[in-house]
Amino acid sequence: MAGGGGGGGGGGGAAPKPKQDELLPHPVKEQLPGVAYCMTSPPPWPEALLLGFQHYLVMLGTTVLIPTSLVPQMGGGNEEKAKMIQTLLFVAGVNTLFQTLFGTRLPAVIGGSYTYMPTTISIVLAGRYTDIVNPQEKFERIMHGIQGALIVASTLQIVLGFSGLWRNLARFLSPLSAVPLVALSGFGLYEFGFPVLAKCIEIGLPQIILLLVFAQYIPHITSGEQHMFDRFAFILSVVIVWLYAHLLTVGGAYKNTGPKIQMSCRTDRAGIIGGSPW
């Protein structure tokens, strides 16, 4: 019996077991469980436009914060700030289209990165720009220096990507090593986001509370297949809080406050729309 079983197992043509270090591909699924929209099941056009606009609002925060912190140090004003925001949005749109049409086609929006902020600030504060008196000339000279540094940095990334060197290095990186990198990148945003929120706590705090309520609590209370509140939590909370801030502005709540509070809380003091060269 034992001998016959062994012979049958040896001559039955069973597939050999894979090696321990051999990677097995995940089975292809047309629809992932718990995910409403996949590659083969896109949302309808009206909902897709709303979701795209919401994603634009999400990335608009980082897109505005980068020029807001850099342009004043570079000697620029509202017009230069508006131009930098427009440039970031345009380049982000072009890169996102390339990302979704060619290559790996990851479902990601390409935007400005805070990874380059420390090196950019070191260029802004470089000694070779301190003797320039004209603010416009200083802004343009610093911008040229930043552009040159970014070109060199991107060239290195292109070489690492197309040569396959990064693919070979990524095999030795475990999720445990990626978690601290992602966490530290996220924690770095607190330095830019939460001090701005603290400048106008009566508007920033309701935004966070409403976002948490719409995204985490209301979906558990309501029943049905329409995931409106959790799917559009950000755009709903932003619209409500902006209307609330506009009512405070029109009602004169900040009429007798200092200039810093007015710049942070009023809806008509950003200067970006007025400084934009239409």
Image: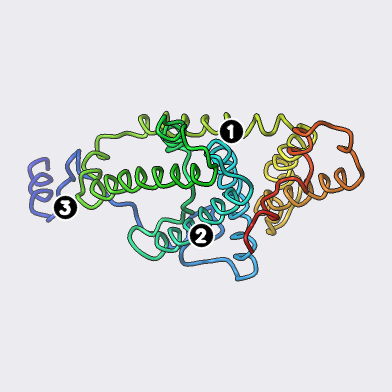
Task: Name the residue nearer the viewer: 78 or 161.
Answer: 78
The residues tagged by marks 1 and 3 sit, at their Cα atoms, a distance apart of 56 Å
**Circle 3 residue:** 15
Quarter residue 221 falls in: top right
Which of the two marks, 1 or 3, is nearer to us in this view?
1
Q: Is residue 62 left or right of residue 168?
A: right
Which residue of the protein is positioned furthest toward the right in this rendering?
251
The residues tagged by marks 2 and 3 sit, at their Cα atoms, a distance apart of 53 Å
The residues tagged by marks 1 and 2 sit, at their Cα atoms, a distance apart of 23 Å
Q: Earlier in the sequence, mark 2 or mark 3?
A: 3
**Residue 238: where, in percent of width, then height?**
72, 48
**Circle 2 residue:** 90
Task: Name the residue nearer the viewer: 132 or 104.
Answer: 132
Q: Is residue 171 left or right of residue 176?
A: left
Number of labels in the image equals: 3
Q: Earlier in the sequence, mark 1 or mark 3?
A: 3
Task: Name the residue nearer the viewer: 124 or 202.
Answer: 124
Amino acid type at circle 2 is Phe
**Residue 261: where, in percent of width, then height?**
78, 33
Amino acid type at circle 1 is Phe
Q: Is residue 74 positioned above or below 29 on the image?
A: above
Circles 1 and 3: CB atoms closer than 8 Å: no
Q: Is residue 31 left or right of residue 214?
A: left
Q: Is residue 179 left or right of residue 58?
A: left
Q: Report the residue at 71% width, 52% height from top.
A: 229
Label of residue 192 in the image: 1
Q: Report the residue at 58% width, 66% height from top.
A: 43
Q: Earlier in the sequence, mark 1 or mark 2?
A: 2
**Residue 27: where, in percent of width, then height?**
35, 55
